[in-house]
Image (cartoon, rainbow, N blue to C red):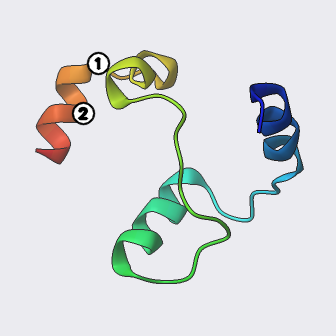
Amino acid sequence: MTYEELLREMEKQKDEMTVMERMMEYAKGNEVDHIPYMLCGADTAANMYGYTLSSIENHWM
């Protein structure tokens, strides 16, 4: 699958849950609308969502 094909497939994916709802339910082992995925790591995504890497590390570690 090429990157362009991946982007087209991702556009078809409809969200029925928020990211937080999905992650919390997935962590509990419950059914979610789709498997959580992220194309980049927390170190690069933190800024995209308005967080610092240290705030994420402090919360999850």
Indicate the position of residue 13 as horizontal and vertical percent values: 81, 54
Question: Horizontal placement of 61 versus 29: left or right?
Answer: left
What residue sits 56% from the left and 82% below the top?
31
Instruction: State which quarter of the image contains the C terminus.
Output: top left
What residue sits 42% from the left and 16% below the top?
47
Q: Secondary structure at mark 2?
A: helix
Q: Secondary structure at mark 1?
A: loop
Residue underneath mark 2: 56
Evaluate if marks 2 and 1 touch, with contact meaning CB atoms under 8 Å apart.
yes
Indicate the position of residue 36 as horizontal and vertical percent values: 53, 56
Q: Residue furthest bottom?
A: 30
Residue 56, picture quadrant: top left
**Count of numbered marks:** 2
Q: Residue furthest front?
A: 1
Indicate the position of residue 17 as horizontal and vertical percent values: 66, 63
Is 21 situated above or below 8? below
Is 17 situated above or below 28? above
Residue 18, picture quadrant: bottom right
As rendered, which of 27 and 37 lies closer to the eye?
37
Question: Horizontal placement of 16 versus 25: left or right?
Answer: right
Indicate the position of residue 41 as horizontal and vertical percent values: 39, 30
Distance between mark 2 and mark 1 Cα atoms: 7 Å
Instruction: State which quarter of the image contains the N terminus.
Output: top right
Residue underneath mark 1: 52
As rendered, which of 44 and 49 lies closer to the eye?
44
Identify residue type, mark 2: Ile
Question: Horizontal placement of 43 versus 31: left or right?
Answer: left
Q: Residues within 10 Å of mark 1 (few under 14, many from 20)?
A: some
Identify residue type, mark 1: Thr
Q: Residues within 10 Å of mark 2 (few under 14, many from 20)?
A: few
Is 4 situated above or below 1? above
